[in-house]
Amino acid sequence: MSVLNLDDEICNYRSSLEAFALKFTGDVEDANDLVQDTILKAIRYMHLYRKETNLAGWLYIIMKNTFINNYRYNVRRRAVIISTDNLLMYQTQKNSAANVGEDKFILKDIHTALANLEPEYSTPFLRYFEGYKYHEIAIEMDIPMGTVKTRIHIARQLLKSQLKMYKSRALNF
């Protein structure tokens, strides 16, 4: 297969790549970006493609690896942004002598409430709290995105009911 034929074949898979990318990202714009990145990488590394290899499978593997690499990069970047944004607030609270003992009890109650949740509710809730998007949690847990949203909502309701004694304190901050 010549370089031009392979280039045309890659572009012929665009619509199926878009559908596959949409399952990964859950967002049309992100899916289009992922497809473009996949096609660019496929063209760039065209010399590594072997004729006996399934072209669609090769493209899907490139897409999957690109998605995973982008996801890891975004998680690391998000963690740095979150940690620097909350640094001043965290240091202020940590240095306040009046809050130390009280905070330990509150954190213990939060951990207990989380431990009381069934894994089907705690896992998606904790992933969402860690910064994962709904579609990323759905892919990880191999469940529909609507189920992820429902389970997170139920987890919130259960946690609210278990931690309602702190509701009035939260309003004072």
Image: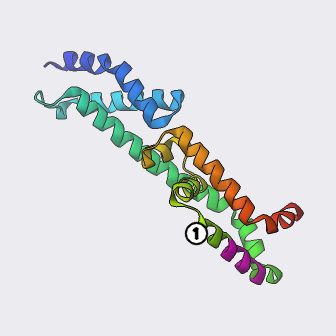
Asked whether 115 or 3 is in front, the reply is 115
Give the quadrant of residue 40: top left
User: Split into 4 quadrants, where in the image is the C terminus?
Assistant: bottom right
Residue drawn at (34%, 27%), measured in percent from left and top? 39
Amino acid type shown at disc 1: Ala
Give the prevailing secondary structure in the magenta stretch: helix
Q: Work out which residue is located at the far left of the displayed protein and give it.
A: 52
* Residues rendered magenta in the picture: 101-109
Give the quadrant of residue 106: bottom right
Residue drawn at (41%, 25%), measured in percent from left and top? 19
Q: Residues within 10 Å of mark 1 (few under 14, many from 20)?
A: few
Residue 23 lies, in percent from the top left, at 44, 33
The secondary structure type at the circle numbered 1 is helix
The residue at which mark 1 appears reads as 115
> Is 106 placed left or right of 130 in the picture?
right
Residue drawn at (82%, 63%), measured in percent from left and top? 167
**Residue 84 in the image: above or below residue 69:** below
Residue 64 lies, in percent from the top left, at 35, 39
